[in-house]
Amino acid sequence: MNQLPPLPSPNPVRQKQGRKNRAEGKAFEERLDATFAYYTDKGYAQIDKTPEPFKIIKRLEQTRFIGCFIKRAQPDYKGTIKGGRSVIFEAKYTSGDRITQDRVSDAQCSYMNLASELGAKCYVIIGFHTNTVYRIPWSVWTDMKEVFGRKYVTEQDLKQYRVAESWNDLLLILD
């Protein structure tokens, strides 16, 4: 039977930072989910979270198991805007002051490129630790080096793509 190698000793500082980053990323995703639910309720769009294909390999005790992702990641959200246009969003959150172009995987890039060629509106939604959100058109994201002179962006670079917020903290992503 194959044994997994022992895990390295935990670093408490990194563990704390990891928990903080996961909590902030989850809050960002929940904010997007609430926004898309609002659009659905109002009849403006139907945009759904793409589930990650996952397979349980072995069940352990109680709620623990060993598993793996069985397919390359697809963009995070897909849907249709009123009038029939497809829309696709890849959502990324960073607790840092910049986000690199390679945060979108090759598989996600391929999917977004094809969807864009077929006429879908494709965007990368970026959330920063400042609680500010930006909607970057896919064509700008893919041409990041030409547009911004480097393969990363900062909040300063993205000012024109800032997403407005409603009085109840929903994101006006489709406006």
Image: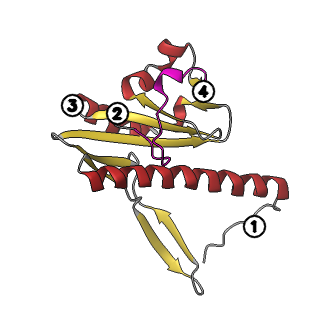
* Badge 4: residue crowd in 10 Å (few <14, some 14–19, many ≥20): some
Dot 3 or dot 2, earlier in sequence = 3
Where disc 4 sits, the SS reads loop
In the picture, residue 64 is in which quadrant? bottom right
Residue at (65, 38) in percent of width and height: 130
Q: Give the magenta-colored segment's residue range.
A: 155-172
Q: Which mark is residue 55?
A: none
Q: Amino acid at mark 2?
A: Asp
Task: Name the side, left or right, on which 17 lies relative to 31.
Answer: right
State which mark lies toward you, 3 or 2: 2
Q: Which mark is residue 155?
A: 4
Q: Amino acid at mark 4?
A: Glu
The one nearer the camera, 17 or 174, is 174
State which mark lies toward you, 1 or 3: 3
Whether residue 5 is in magenta: the answer is no
In the picture, residue 129 is in which quadrant? top right
Residue receiving disc 1: 6
Where disc 2 sits, the SS reads loop
- Marks 3/2: CA–CA distance: 18 Å
Residue that sits furthest to the front in the current view: 167
Residue receiving disc 2: 175
Whether residue 73 can be seen here: no
Q: Amino acid at mark 1?
A: Pro
Dot 4 or dot 1, earlier in sequence = 1
Dot 4 or dot 2, earlier in sequence = 4
Q: Which mark is residue 119?
A: 3
